[in-house]
Image: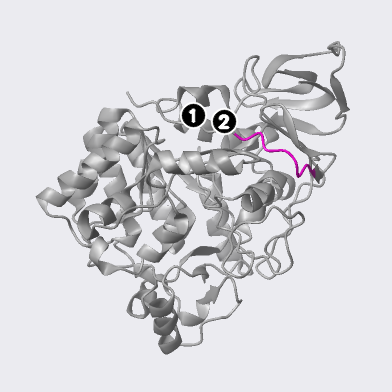
Amino acid sequence: MQTLLRGGRVIDPGTGWDGVADVLVQDGRIAAVGSDLVAPEGATVLDVTGLVVGPGFVDLHSHVHSIAGQRLQAMDGVTTALDLEAGLMPIGRAYERAAQDGRPLHYGFSASWSAARAQALLGMEPDASFDTSMALLGDPEWQRSSTPTELAAWLALLERELADGALGIGVLLGYAPRSDPAEFLAVSRLAASAGAPTYTHVRELVEADPSTPIDGSEEIAIAAAETGAAMHHCHVNSTSRRHVDRVLATLERARTEGARVTVEAYPYGAGSTGIGASFLAPERLHHWNIGPSNIVLVETGERITDERRLREVRAADPGADCIVEFFDERVEADRALLHRSLAFPDAIVASDAMPVLCGQGRTESRQWPLPPGASTHPRTAGTFAKTLRLMVRESGTWTWTEAFRRCSYLPARVLDDVAPAARAKGHLGVGADADIVVLDPARITDAATYIDSVRPSVGVRHLLVSGTAVIRDGELQAEAYPGRALRGEPA
């Protein structure tokens, strides 16, 4: 399969190149980049004059696990969607299931810290299901500190998962915030010895909860310094909230001192999780400076009225997806905090995309457009386009080269050591994977809202995944399932 992209503005964040050129794709790889390339016989030629051509976006933090969700992400410019914060277990079953169902985008998973703990502490057999992981959040028994025997058991499970191809270890520490900090150091040492990153939803900050065993942002900096592990701080905007400047300063200090710490952010003032999360307990909401009315159920749109209703819903369905409002994007000061999270040097854009709820408890649909009533968090559909709108088109904070560096190049580099195949992603060098997004620089924007959350982004004209068109002339190609697994190869 051969495709020639003719006359676009080519952005390669791997080299810093920004100029008009042709890109030839052959057998799933970049075959040539240059002027006036000759189209091979039988090649598809696309005139992309006036459009921006760059490496497809690599999303390190996507929980969609479905064709429906990946199609929304494709319309947002994503070519690789990885669940690294939560992960799935057993990893082999997760990869097998995705391959059997087919995926429009490349996919991959980390080893699930929470599932390993649940197996060791509760005897719960993991089923490689994100829904099961969400339901687990409301069970306090898996959140406690481990005995030495339990710790050894779940560390062994994580080590097995790394050997089976996990892309590192996903640590939902914010959901077990009272667990012993020594356990996190043990995970970090395991990751360092395997040459694999950790991806952490940090525990609460000391400003919000002075009784926390250790400040969440300090913990990740200390662990990285002590163990030498590569440590990724997930969604710094939502876990730091109005303390984000202090957290970013902590991470910058750690990096200056040599710690291998990376950080990600998304451009929304509301997060999403299972309503049974420990930090959404009525007695803990004041740590976030919010109340029950700042929580909305995704599937029904119900805004929680009071503590009684919150306790009721948490007991009935702890895994129910909800939206949690932590910033008010109508307020300039809150918008500025989001902006600083994204603008932080080398901050990576990652969506934290959530499952698409298609009604009657379903999280999958091959129907396109998505069926009426489908719902999710708008970040699933719009994170990358919204970031480009805010940071490039409207504020001019980033050049297009910097935007592709944050959305494509830097996230791929997080994976270089654990998954050598990632080295062919995030750039447009000859021999690189032909994962390419072609977008209209004047029109690229998000369209999803909290009310209409599955509206696809606007402005992605073409999207190639391993050289296969998933989007052609702005239209999703519903028959295209070129996604392949990205697997770890531990040291």
Q: Residue at x 20, y 48 (%)?
A: 183
Q: Residue at x 86, y 32 (%)?
A: 50
- Specify start and end residues of the magenta stretch as a single range: 476-483
Q: Residue at x 38, y 77 (%)?
A: 286
What amino acid is labelled 1 in the image? Answer: Arg
Q: Which residue is mark 2?
A: 409
Question: Looking at the picture, how far across and down is residue 311, in whole percent?
Answer: 39, 83
Q: Is residue 204 visible?
A: no
Question: Looking at the picture, how far across and down is residue 354, in whole percent?
Answer: 55, 57
Q: Which residue is mark 1?
A: 413
Task: State the SS at label 1.
Answer: helix
CB atoms at circles 1 and 2 under 8 Å apart?
yes
What amino acid is labelled 2 in the image? Answer: Tyr
**Screen quadrant of the C terminus:** top left
Considering the whole magenta stretch, tell me its main secondary structure. Answer: loop
Question: Looking at the picture, how far across and down is residue 46, in whole percent?
Answer: 86, 27
Scheme by which the image is coloured: one colour
Residue density around tag 1, few if under 14, some if 14–19, many if 20 or more, within 10 Å: some
Q: Which mark is residue 273?
A: none
Task: State the SS at label 2.
Answer: helix
Q: Residue at x 39, y 36 (%)?
A: 166
Frontmost residue, 402 versus 422:
422
**Screen quadrant of the N terminus:** top right
Frontmost residue, 285 versus 81:
81
Give the vertical position of 29 relative to 473 (above or below): above
Is 140 contained in the magenta span? no
Q: Quadrant of residue 144?
A: bottom left
